[in-house]
Image (cartoon, rainbow, N blue to C red):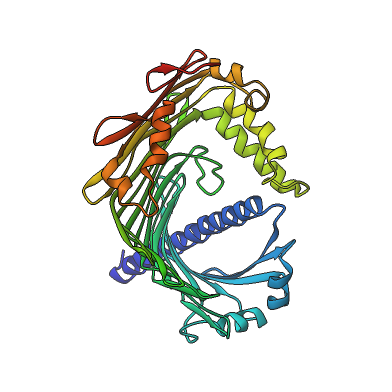
Amino acid sequence: MRKGAWIGGLVAVIGAGYVTGVYLASEQVAVQYQRYVAALSENYRGVATVSSKVDSSFFSSANKLSLEFNDLPEPVLEWAQTNTIDFDIKFSHGFLSSHSVLTIAESELRNKINGYQVKPDKEPLLLSSDYKYDLFEGSVLVTGEFSADAFKHNSADMELLIGSVKGPFSLLDDTFTLDFIARPSSLKVAGMEFQVAQMRLEQSAKSLTGNVLKAGLAIDSEATIKIDGFKVKAQGDGLEVNGLLLEIDQHVAGDRLVIATNYSAEEVRIKRSSGELKFDNSVVKLSLDVDMQASVALLGDIQKLQEQGVVDVNDPAVIFPLLNGLTQKGVNLQAQRLAVSLEGSTLEGKVDLKMDPFSIEEVMLDRQAVLQKLDLEADFLLPKKLLAALPDYDSSQLGFFVGMGFLLDEGDNYRFSISAKQGKVELNGHAMPGM
């Protein structure tokens, strides 16, 4: 074989391999895109109609995604002059890879949004994604970055600033991660002022169904929200919270779904005309566990109601019957630590509650039956030094509660404890009459 023919054959093989790689990437990304559209349609059913148009070629495609909302509030509809928002999504395909950019489509609505941007020359919203096709695993890894510009509105009676948001994300079949940072926001209205410092959201989740886009429930999920500071001012009074942290962990243990939360703040300041209080060591740690399958069924029932759009899912009369499925497998709640410190004294407590299977109707109609199913231990310690520092504190009022047996006087502290088991309730170690 002549050298030229050999080289030409090699180029042809390489070229064919490259073309095949581009084709596989475009096909897999098309499948992935249809997953997104299907997930949006399902999640917005009863709220908005989702539609998509695709204009594709071998190396690229130009897609348009539309959300037509069914019932927007009248003020929003009057401002927007439309109930539909359109997005442009442009794809470019390479060898076993693809890149897409999502933006708000050119429209009168887009022009209105531009008018509120802090930097009108930027895209108000941008979603940039990279797709990597694994030929052996048959999966598509999506990584990208989300960004939204800051927005402001100033009028005679209101000043509003919504900080910009930016951060990376990743998506692979049943897993999802993100790490977003929101810049400071503020609001001045009716003599009040609200300020939120920089906020960071970190989240990872693994779905129950294997498709995180359609997951009604995550089997493993962790989320952390960190807020540098939060302030409220009104007529000389104020509230300031620094170092606010919220952690949420959700996981499956056997046949139970466990949700654990941790709220904490480095410092809380309350400013009043009578003086300032400075709290620290503020902690609330809670955990809740319920039946796993009942949780899945509850979410499915709520989604069906939302899709039907004929009932208000915020109506207790609608939700309570659905909750029976959850409570029929028992509910456990723990407050491992409740604490706040002032001038070196710490108010703290803990709660451990277990409920055998019960129904919502029992809670409303048969108190004694509920007590038979209740296992409760709760204990709170209230330092007198901390209480004395509170405005308008009146020790004689607590003396009345001590005399009635609701509080125990332990010298430097007051204590409140309550327990309930098999229908018997004890307050501070003494049986409560009628219980």
**Of residues 395 and 94, the one drawn nearer to the viewer in this rendering:** 395
Quarter of the image for residue 77 reads bottom right
In the displayed structure image, the side of residue 60 where residue 360 appears, left or right: right
Task: In the rendered view, tell whether residue 37 sits above or below residue 6.
Answer: above
Q: Which residue is drawn at 52% across and 16% down?
A: 433
Q: Residue at x 37, y 18 (%)?
A: 429
User: What residue occupies the far left of the structure in this picture?
Assistant: 344
Tally the numbered discs.
0
Quarter of the image for residue 58 reads bottom right
User: What residue occupies the far front of the structure in this picture?
Assistant: 396
Whether residue 112 is visible here, answered yes or no, is yes
Quarter of the picture containing the N terminus is bottom left
Q: Residue at x 21, y 48 (%)?
A: 344
Location of residue 86 in the rendering, given as x and y in whole percent from the top left corner: 64, 71
Q: Which residue is drawn at 31% across and 48% down?
A: 388
**Of residues 198 and 104, the one drawn nearer to the viewer in this rendering:** 198
Task: In the rendered view, tell whether residue 190 sits above or below residue 353.
Answer: below
Location of residue 176 in the rendering, given as x and y in whole percent from the top left corner: 43, 50
Location of residue 431 in the rendering, given as x and y in whole percent from the top left corner: 45, 15
Task: In the rendered view, tell whether residue 29 sits above or below residue 232.
Answer: above
